[in-house]
Image (spheres, grey):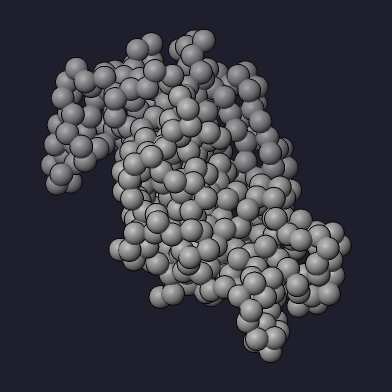
Amino acid sequence: MKGSDVFVGNVSKSFDDFTALNNVSLEIKKGEFFSLLGPSGCGKTTLLRIIAGFESPDTGIVTFDGSDVLPLPPNRRQANTVFQNYALFPHLSVFENVAFPLRIKKTEKSKIDDKVKEYLKLVQLEAHANKKTNQLSGGQKQRVAIARALINEPRVLLLDEPLSALDAKLRQHMLIELDQIHDKIGITFIYVTHDQQEALSVSDRIAVMNQGNVLQVGTPHEIYESPATGFVAKFIGETNLFDGEIISAAPIQKAEGEYMVDLDISGLGRIKVTTVDEFKPGQQVSFTIRPEKVVISKEKPVTTREDINLFHGFVEEPLYSGFQTKFYVKVKDQYLIRVIKQHAKYSDEGPDIVWKDSVYLSWSANDGYIVGIKDENPGVTKS
């Protein structure tokens, strides 16, 4: 593996009275595609700049393969950065932009030619070698920036929102290419983004950040299905988030280590949810259920299962988008619950559930998740 293990230990950074990072610790594995994900101002770019050497932390350490890199300038850290604005030289050709780091190092001309061709091939720009950068599309410019960052063969590639200037379709295409490049060269990628879908699509692991803190680190599946906090649940995709009180928690006989929890949601009623964590009656918690986990139907489901949650409501707003419809369903005149229904089959009639329809919502206790102590601002719209 060509990459480096990166360790960030108890790093804090303030700018005047603003705390950008608050005692952040992370372990990033060699060769991993690791994403720092969070809203604007959460500290992710500051953390990336500290790893790169463009900023110094107030406290804490940063190591590559166990060696302290904080005393080293950026050009000696074996880490290169791809910036949001490309930072290309407009007066130079594509070839010369990519060759620039090698010319600075006074590499032999024959080696420069061979390596530039190799990396232009990697990013599929061989045919554009002699063009000026102002003749390229946004996606091509980003590929030039990536090739230039990789030609020095760093052990860590830092990417600061590299696709944010591209349109949606090109961003998706470039994301696939970026993942393929990572698979080919095998070095450590640390990727900063505020786009949840980008992070979920390509990351081996994700650190979700907010207000200078790391709230959760995990695989895309862990982050999405088992969010650690209400903020993570709301930030990663769409969700329904409720505040509730634990009424009871009993071990499930056929599932060792799991509990069936009975929650009371004020104004909504009782909800059943399974969990591997122990809760006590009276605890105030937040509960999340993803819109795609909720089943919507016009007829009341017939079931004898005790683990099914069932509610009646009325469609406030159906939003049809071709492959799916998102419904906002008013339940008990207090809660708008989001539901996503995928359209897997062709229908001449279009969506069979429309505005103002009376509907039933149901989901299994296994599909919800308790995210811990309740947030002050629940993610379900309450009228």
| Image vertical order of residue 375 relative to residue 254, above or below | above
| Along the viewing direction, whichever of 360 and 330 lies nearer the viewer | 330
Question: For the view shown, which residue lies furthest in the bottom direction?
Answer: 110
Q: Is residue 213 left or right of residue 75?
A: left
| Image vertical order of residue 218 relative to residue 15, above or below | below
Q: Position of residue 232 (x, y in %)?
A: 42, 36
Residue at figure coordinates x 62%, y 36% from the top left: 325
| Image vertical order of residue 5 relative to residue 304, above or below | below
Task: Examine the rendering and report whether any part of residue 55 can be seen.
Answer: yes
Residue at figure coordinates x 63%, y 23% from the top left: 317
Task: Locate the N terminus and report the quarter of the image it occupies.
Answer: bottom left
Q: Position of residue 27 (x, y in %)?
A: 33, 55
Q: Position of residue 337 (x, y in %)?
A: 49, 24
Residue at figure coordinates x 21%, y 40% from the top left: 276
| Along the viewing direction, whichever of 2 and 63 lies nearer the viewer | 63
| Along the viewing direction, whichever of 69 and 186 lies nearer the viewer | 69
Q: Is residue 107 left or right of residue 255?
A: right
Name the image quarter holding residue 362: top left
Q: Is residue 328 left or right of residue 283?
A: right
Name the image quarter holding residue 306: top left
| Image vertical order of residue 109 relative to residue 1, above or below | below
Name the image quarter holding residue 7: bottom left
Residue at figure coordinates x 69%, y 70% from the top left: 100
Task: Examine the rendering and report whether any part of residue 311 can be seen.
Answer: no
Q: Count every numbered label the image shows and give the total.
A: 0
Q: Position of residue 219 (x, y in %)?
A: 39, 53
